[in-house]
Amino acid sequence: MQNPTTTTLGYALFATRWLQAPLYFGLVAAQGVYVYKFFKELWTLILMCVSGHATETYVMLAVLKLVDVVMIANLLIMVIVGGYETFVSRIGLQGHRDQPEWLSHVNSNVLKVKLATAIVGISSVHLLQMFVDVHHTSRHALLWGTVIHMAFIASAAILAYMSGPMVAHTDRGHADRAPAAPAQAPDHASRQHTEPESERHRAAAIPPQPAPDTDAEARIRAAGFPARKVLEEFDQQHPRGLDRDVLARLGKADFVDARRNVVFVGPPGTGKTHLAVALGVRACQAGHRVLFATAAQWAARLAGARAAGRLDAELAALDDHPLLIVDEVGYTPLDAASAGLFFQLVAHRYERASLIVTSDRPLGRWDEVFGPSAPALTDRLAHHAEIVRLDGDSYRTRRAATAWAD
Ligand code: ADP
Ligand code: MG
């Protein structure tokens, strides 16, 4: 139990991060100075060219200077946006068409590596300037320029190397807490560390194209996905009226930490399985164990467990998987016994662990699938859930139609 005084003190200290906000606006002013400097240099270059005084070396040096100014300005914007997002407050650009690729997975580690590589870029431009103007550069300056550049490269490499194992280490920490096989006894402790876990997700938020991670790959293989689908390959224009913000938010896999559910509803071919698998892949990359199966396969699995008299043990063992995916609810009719088993699965995981369910019919029509248990089942499933409706034509037939037209 946290002492209220320490909590208040902690919050008060945390609030002082806002003191940093004006610093970022100061950097915006510095950005303005660079814009002024850029145009001054450009104007001089144009005047020299027009008056015929510009030699080739001069033009090259002047252009390098412009590139240099732009790179420093880029570095500035990275510090301004990335620093503000990491240390002050979320800007909430998710879904903005101009959101930089790196911002979705920015954290202090990523930021350090980005800055170090930006500095290497700037120092290589400086070195190039020296080499272009080698006759006017002293040996001393050339030597030190090269040594300093190498030092920047080395420090960037070390930072990049260190940030990899740091992320992998936190990931492994999570994997160690979870038991190895689904059939083992449940380890509720593995789901009780929500606080460090959500912290870890902030630190190692899922990048759009994550670096290969052998643990994540192992989890993806173990999940039993029918095919590997990723969010990046999902054409968000295709389903009618799809809320991109919702997908961007779900793509962070936070819903797994929050033990919330996701339900994809829509006609065949609108990408329900694609999205369910893509979110499953992201959850695996975020350190969660995932299991994918169709509704019919889940029904068979649970029926088998019940026949062996170990349904409760099976449901408890599935708790090792923070995310289960139930694909194609409604495609095959369920008998009353299977409907009852589903109800038990949903009721067992309610507020305990996440489910992704895909169905060709809205929740209001699930009585056609689950019979009388439908209202109680949908009530629990939908209580903490994101219901995503996918409307429109089948992506499969659209592709086929386009191929025919071609
Ligand atoms: P559903 O489960 O809704 O029937 P699927 O997810 O199986 O549909 O989609 C059918 C095929 O079309 C899959 O190969 C999937 O990758 C592809 N697909 C569907 N929607 C999209 C989309 N919006 N962008 C890219 N591929 C899509
Ligand atoms: Mg499907």
Image (spheres, rainbow, N blue to C red):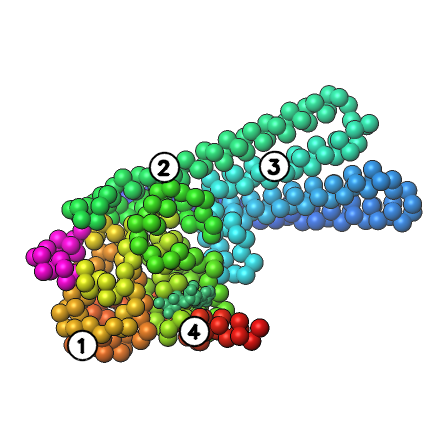
Q: Are marks 1 and 3 in contact (CB under 8 Å)?
A: no
Q: Are marks 2 and 1 in contact (CB under 8 Å)?
A: no
Q: Which residue is painted at 82% across and 46% down in the image?
A: 45
Q: What residue occupies the far left of the structure in this picture? A: 309
- Between the residue at mark 4 and the residue at mark 1, the CA separation in whole angstroms equals 28 Å
Which element type, helix, strand or loop, lies under badge 2?
helix
- Between the residue at mark 1 and the residue at mark 3, the CA separation in whole angstroms equals 64 Å
- Between the residue at mark 4 and the residue at mark 2, the CA separation in whole angstroms equals 42 Å
Q: Are marks 4 and 3 in contact (CB under 8 Å)?
A: no
- Bin the neighbour count of mark 4 within 10 Å (Cα to Cα): few under 14, some 14-19, many 20 and up: some
* Residue 304 among those drawn in magenta: yes
Q: Please name whichever residue, 170 or 220, is drawn nearer the observer in this view of the structure.
A: 220
Q: Is mark 4 within 8 Å of ligand 1?
A: yes
Q: Is mark 2 within 8 Å of ligand 1?
A: no
- Closer to us: mark 4 or mark 3? 4
Q: Which residue is painted at 78% across and 38% down in the image?
A: 61
Rendered position, 155 above or below 176: above
Q: Magenta region: which residues?
A: 302-317
Q: If you read the primary sequence from the N terminus, does the residue marked by circle 4 or circle 1 appear first?
A: 1
118 sits to left or right of 202: right
Q: Which residue is mark 3?
A: 119
Q: Which residue is mark 4?
A: 394
- Between the residue at mark 2 and the residue at mark 1, the CA separation in whole angstroms equals 47 Å
Q: Position of residue 347 (x, y in %)?
A: 18, 63
Q: Position of residue 355 (x, y in %)?
A: 27, 60
